[in-house]
Image (cartoon, rainbow, N blue to C red):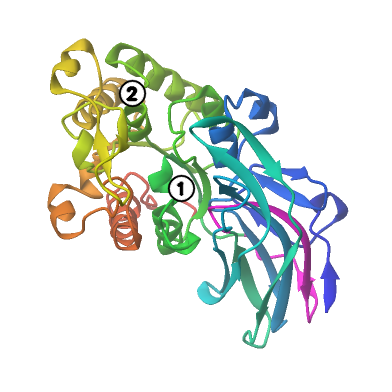
Amino acid sequence: MIDVGLDPAQGSPVAIRGAVHLEHGERGILPRRVRPDQWSRIPDDFMLASVSECAGVRLAFRTAGTAIELDVVGTKMVPDEKAPLPVSLYELVVDGRLERTAESAGGARFVFTFERPDAYRVAGEPETLRFDGLPPGEKEVELWLPYSDEVELVGLRADAPVLPPSVPAGRRWLHHGSSISHGFIATRTSRTWPVAAARSAGVELTSAAFSGNAVLDQLTARTMRDTPADLISVKLGINVVNGDLMRARIFRSAVHGFLDTIRDGHPDTPLLVVSPIFCEPVEQLPGPTAQDPFRTDLWTISLGHAGELAEGKLSLSVIRDELERIVRQRSAEDPALFYLHGHRLYGPSDAERMPLPDNLHPGDDVQELMAGRFARIVFGPGGPFALRPGAAPA
């Protein structure tokens, strides 16, 4: 097997796509999805864990090898030091087709619960993930990291030389969203709806989806401002309601500020604002949301009351109205700004036949539904991200 360096500063042939910054860890390279100048702005341990995870990050290279090995230290969020580490999946794509997966059941721990403010790390040892029996001949390879883990890339080997990947042919799509975009209960990265939509549409995804943390943070907006992109989408609202974090007055101002910051770096880039998909407990009620204490399974309910809407609290219905109004107002001077109602991706009738497993997050079936609809509505003919006649693809 031939050892391949992963440090781009030392001439690595491997491209690490979907990261906005690469950091040197104790053993290797850490892909990051927040700009380094914004890292110190991360306000708490939950957001630190979320932004550290590798949603949408993949290694890209060419090789004629039929066996590939990747050494990693994956850090997984767990409630205590004794809890079993969850299994995560690494996916190897060859010439656009998923060829192999490898399971990771080890690694380091990020010990965290919402009930304890004392998150800490427990070190783990590197694992070697092997992909063999690959098709012969030179091929384009993408190795997708698990969306659920922070991954330190320690080493890569192949049984043939590794070469730089071809230059991507697709446009660069930068997407921000909540755990619904991050993945959460999807069984693997390739089944999260932004990854599936990007692969279907032939675009290069950078995911700024942060579970539980799509709350209009300026550190997110500044990261997006400074990240190269040909297309940008922001899916906003559900986390604001989940935490009952804002009232209508400050929500309006925060949305304007978030969009203004993105526009500072991308004044003319197509920018799509997507409102929340259907979520029954907070469609007409404000948050906060919580787990139903009378059920043994995870089931989301709202602790809000309808009368609180008059006080400026936010339900998803209110948020959709606010976002549509803001986009309509701004688009008079910003013709590259668009709006998509979240029910077009997953609405009330979909919920009747394809319910959300925990009353909040999509399973694989709904992720697939959303990916297909987003690709068709947004990237398809007449959509806000459709390739215009005569325009270059990248």
Please check the rendered image and state whether residue 156 is part of the magenta-colored stretch, yes or no. Answer: yes
The first of marks 1 and 2 along the sequence is 1
- Image quadrant assignment for residue 103: bottom right
* Circle 1 or circle 2, nearest the eye: 2
Q: Secondary structure at mark 1?
A: helix
Horizontal side of 95 relative to 6 (left or right) equals left
Quick one: SS at disc 2? Answer: loop
State the extent of the magenta-drawn residues as a range.
Answer: 146-167
On residue 182, the disc is 1
Question: Farthest residue toward the right?
Answer: 10
Please state which amino acid type lies under the numbered disc 2.
Asp
Residue in front for this viewpoint, 348 or 18? 348
User: In which image quadrant can residue 127 be found?
Assistant: bottom right
Quarter of the picture containing the N terminus is: bottom right
Say the numbered circle drawn on residue 2: none
In terms of depth relative to the viewer, which is nearer, 203 or 314?
314
Quarter of the rendering containing residue 66: bottom right
Residue at image coords 58%, 47%: 53
Residue drawn at x 18%, y 28% is 285
Identify which amino acid the numbered label 1 is placed on: His
Label 1 and label 2: CA atoms lie apart by 20 Å
Residue 4 relative to residue 351: left or right:
right
Judging depth in this view, the residue of 101 and 223 nearest the camera is: 101
Q: Are marks 1 and 2 in contact (CB under 8 Å)?
A: no
- Neighbourhood count class around disc 1 (C-alpha, 10 Å): few under 14, some 14–19, many 20 upward: many
The image position of residue 168, as x and y in percent, is 59, 59
Residue 386 visible within the image: yes
87 vs 138: above or below: above
Please give the residue where the numbered disc 2 appears in the rendered image. 244
Up the image or down, 143 lies above or below 34; here it is below
Q: Measuring from the top left, give residue 83's x and y in whole percent.
A: 56, 53
